[in-house]
Image (cartoon, rainbow, N blue to C red):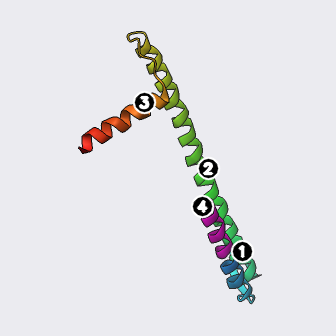
Amino acid sequence: MKGQTYVILTFVFVILIAIFAVTNVESVEVNYFFWKRESPLILLILFSVLMGGLLTMVAGSIKYFNLQRENRQLAENIKRLKTELSKYTTVEFDDEVNQQAEDTKANNHHD
């Protein structure tokens, strides 16, 4: 459901930007760093939206990959610690057993 909401909001946003851009078709003078030039406002709007989207995507991708790397490192640490702990105990660790223990602890805490 969450993914569908993002897709719908994206389409709405794209439609609004397209309508805004199409209603602004006159030429404007743009001051580039070393020269000035006349450009259609619609192209400037679309170019600005495109560059903003690309920069947002790059920033999000960097954050995503950093979180993936951190998650992988933490999973390796958990595995290493479970292996080390199993040397000293006879209890085997199972994710389902761990979840049940946490649920029982949470239920007892609320009582």
Q: Which residues are magenta?
A: 1-13
Q: Amino acid at mark 1?
A: Leu
Secondary structure at badge 4 equals loop
Q: Is residue 73 at least partly visible in the picture?
A: yes
Q: In which quadrant of the rendered image does the N terminus lie?
A: bottom right
For mark 2, what is the residue?
61
Q: Residues within 10 Å of mark 2 (few under 14, many from 20)?
A: few
Q: What residue lies at 23% left-to-right and 44% top-to-bottom?
A: 111
Of the numbered discs 2 and 1, the one sitting upstream in the chain is 1
Residue nearest the observer in this picture, 83 or 64: 83
Q: What residue lies at 46% left-to-right and 22% top-to-bottom?
A: 93
Q: Residue furthest left?
A: 111
Judge whether residue 10 is colored magenta. yes
Whole-number angstrom distance, CA of label 2 to CA of label 4 = 22 Å
Secondary structure at badge 2 equals helix
Q: Residues within 10 Å of mark 3 (few under 14, many from 20)?
A: few
Q: Position of residue 88 (x, y in %)?
A: 38, 10
For mark 3, what is the residue?
98
Predominant SS along the magenta part: helix
Of the numbered discs 2 and 3, the one sitting upstream in the chain is 2
Residue nearest the observer in this picture, 50 or 37: 50
Residue nearest the observer in this picture, 45 or 99: 99
For mark 1, what is the residue?
46
Whole-number angstrom distance, CA of label 3 to CA of label 4 = 29 Å
- Dot in front, 2 or 4: 4
- Dot in front, 1 or 4: 4
Residue nearest the observer in this picture, 20 or 105: 105
The image shows residue 15, relative to residue 95, as above or below, that is: below
Q: Amino acid at mark 4?
A: Met
